Amino acid sequence: MKQILAIILFFSFYQGIGQAKKIGPDELLFEQAYLIQNFIQEELALDYYLYSSSVDKSAKELAVDIRDKMLIKAIDLYQELIKEYPKSKWTFRALNNIGFAELALQNKDKAKLHFEQVLKSNANDKEKGGAGSGIMGEPYANYKNRAARELAKIYIEEQNFDKALEYLALTKQYTYQHFCGNAYAEEKITMSLLYAKCYVGLNQIDKAIQTLFPNLLENGLADNSELVHFTYDILSTQYKQEELKSLFAASFENHQIKTIKEKEIQYEQDYITFLGTDIELNSWQLEYLTGEEREQEIKRIYEKSLFTQLLDKNEKE
């Protein structure tokens, strides 16, 4: 099993952490714990053994045992850091990472406690650096924003939708920090989907649809496929297939332009109105095209939309 060899090599490297560079004992504990946690996620590739139906029972049990023991070791190191160095700058990151480790171990109640500790702390979401160390995809820590969002996800899974909405509201208090438009686009889609799941759970279908629709069409910045599938599933319970397809096609045929004013900026925005909700058409080419070429670009947006493809596919079936 290649994973076993990887673990042996990993622990040979793990023993040398702190020797190659001079770091404090608190940072050393964090680096060791994070290395273990990240190694499980990025290098071991245990998901195949954990979730594949073609893997035999003994291989799956071994994969679970390896993952759980390594996660417990990481948690122990994080907890030692928090206990011995409570004022360390690594404490909030340790709390955050324990929360995710407990989630991976299916210990939701323990995960809740650690994410709640983050929310009650004086952690600064604008602190530079992601939840790990070194060069991270996230330029800011987003401690409380992330904790609130993860707590909302847990309560959605537990079907406590009112509680989930409380934590989603906290993400507006602790706003997401980033400098990249793609990251903000992804965050917007994620939050729309989480809110919509709550509204569906509370049987507020119209509110869910209004929340989802602004992100129904692809924007070229972030993947919205999960949101589109979720929207399609909801609408399929409310409308017949041919009715949905006809209404969606008609919304493109009747596309319009409106003037948007934001502070000192004014611009024109193409949009469609589908089931009473305006949806922006996101294509930089529309800024430059006119006449027939413009109509062809709008037709292309319609035809390439995942929502259109789902309507076409399921109509044929």
Image: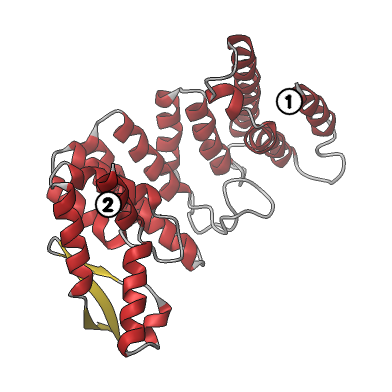
Whether residue 217 appears in this view of the structure is yes
Residue at image mark 2: 311
Q: In this view, does 132 lie to the left or right of 95?
A: right
Q: Tell me where residue 11 appears, x and y as whole percent.
A: 80, 27
Give neighbour class at mark 1: few <14, some 14-19, many 20+ (Cα, 10 Å): some
Q: Is residue 266 left or right of residue 210?
A: right
The residue drawn where x is 19% and y is 52% is: 209
Q: Tell me where residue 185 appears, x and y as whole percent.
A: 42, 62
At mark 2, the secondary structure is helix
Q: In which quarter of the image is residue 54?
A: top right
Most extreme residue toward the right is 20
Q: Which quarter of the figure is the N terminus placed in?
A: top right
Number of marks in the rendered image: 2
Q: Tell me where residue 292 appears, x and y as whole percent.
A: 32, 86
Residue at image mark 1: 3
- Look at label 2 and name its amino acid: Leu
Q: In which quarter of the image is residue 85?
A: top right
